[in-house]
């Protein structure tokens, strides 16, 4: 999958389309492959992809699988110019130690916090605290699974860096996305 992403980014760049950064999920199998980082660097270099266009994404659960390996892996990726993120933050057993010790660039706040329910005011208070806290570590935030303009306004108001969800677009085929990137009005 990663090589397909790099090949696709290269085709966008060669076509003169301004590419946006792409997040690539790391599987557990890849995570435990001792050559994983070297493979990612080699593939990126093969397609001459600027490193700022690739964000390597780890799930929150990987922290608890092997935090020492995750720290070592993230440091190696960052040394190679990659951006690194933690996905699904808050879905499992998040730890503030994760934010203290792991040099990530982006924290993706799980959609769990934005579901309607009796505890929504508490959830939103937690989101506001998370956004405020990680800014102190120069970590950018992404709110996932956003479905209403009310949520968008709340997130903009608390300084969330990026907002993604159905409120903007549903998943779309590659050609439709490329057309969207090519349209200066978008």
Image (spheres, rainbow, N blue to C red):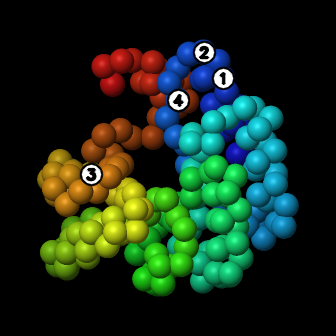
Q: Secondary structure at mark 2?
A: loop
The residue shown at (17%, 48%) is: 149
Q: Which circle's residue, 3 or 2, is located before the other in the chain?
A: 2
Residue labelled with disc 3: 147
Task: Give neighbour class at mark 3: few <14, some 14-19, many 20+ (Cα, 10 Å).
Answer: some
Mark earlier in primary sequence (1, 4) = 1
Residue at image location 66% in from the left, 73% down from the top: 70
Q: Residue furthest top?
A: 15
Q: Which residue is denoted by mark 4 in the rendering?
A: 19
| Screen quadrant of the N terminus | top right
Q: Evaluate if marks 3 and 2 touch, with contact meaning CB atoms under 8 Å apart.
A: no
- First in residue order: circle 3 vs circle 4: 4
Question: Label 2, on which residue?
Answer: 15
**On screen, residue 151 above or below 42:** below
Residue 64 position in % (x across, y down): 60, 83
Closest to the observer, 147 or 94 = 94
What whole-number distance in Å separates the C-alpha atoms at marks 3 and 1? 31 Å
Circle 1 is placed at which residue position? 11
Above or below: residue 30 compared with residue 15: below
Give the CA distance from mark 2 to mark 1. Answer: 6 Å
Q: Earlier in the sequence, mark 3 or mark 1?
A: 1
Foreground tag (3 vs 2): 2
Labelled pair 2, 1 in contact (Cβ < 8 Å): yes
Q: Residue at x 45, y 40 (%)?
A: 171
Q: Is residue 175 left or right of residue 91?
A: right
Label 2: few (<14), some (14–19) or many (≥20) C-alpha neighbours in 10 Å: few
- Quarter of the figure with the C terminus: top left
Badge 4: few (under 14), some or many (20 or more) residues near its Cα, within 10 Å?
some
């Amino acid at each position: 999958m990663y090589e397909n992403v790099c090949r696709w980014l290269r085709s966008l760049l060669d076509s003169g389309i301004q590419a946006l950064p792409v997040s690539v999920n790391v599987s557990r199998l890849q995570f435990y492959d001792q050559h994983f980082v070297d493979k990612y660097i080699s593939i990126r270099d093969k397609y001459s992809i600027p490193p700022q266009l690739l964000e390597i994404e780890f799930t929150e659960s990987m922290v608890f699988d092997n935090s020492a390996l995750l720290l070592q892996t993230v440091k190696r990726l960052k040394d190679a110019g990659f951006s690194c993120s933690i996905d699904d933050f808050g879905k499992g057993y998040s730890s503030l130690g994760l934010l203290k010790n792991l040099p990530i660039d982006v924290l993706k706040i799980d959609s769990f916090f934005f579901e309607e329910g009796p505890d929504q005011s508490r959830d939103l208070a937690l989101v506001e605290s998370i956004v405020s806290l990680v800014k102190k570590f120069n970590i950018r935030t992404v709110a996932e699974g956003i479905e209403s303009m009310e949520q968008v306004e709340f997130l903009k108001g608390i300084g969330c860096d990026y907002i993604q969800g159905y409120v903007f677009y549903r998943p779309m085929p590659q050609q439709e996305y490329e057309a969207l990137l090519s349209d200066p009005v978008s």
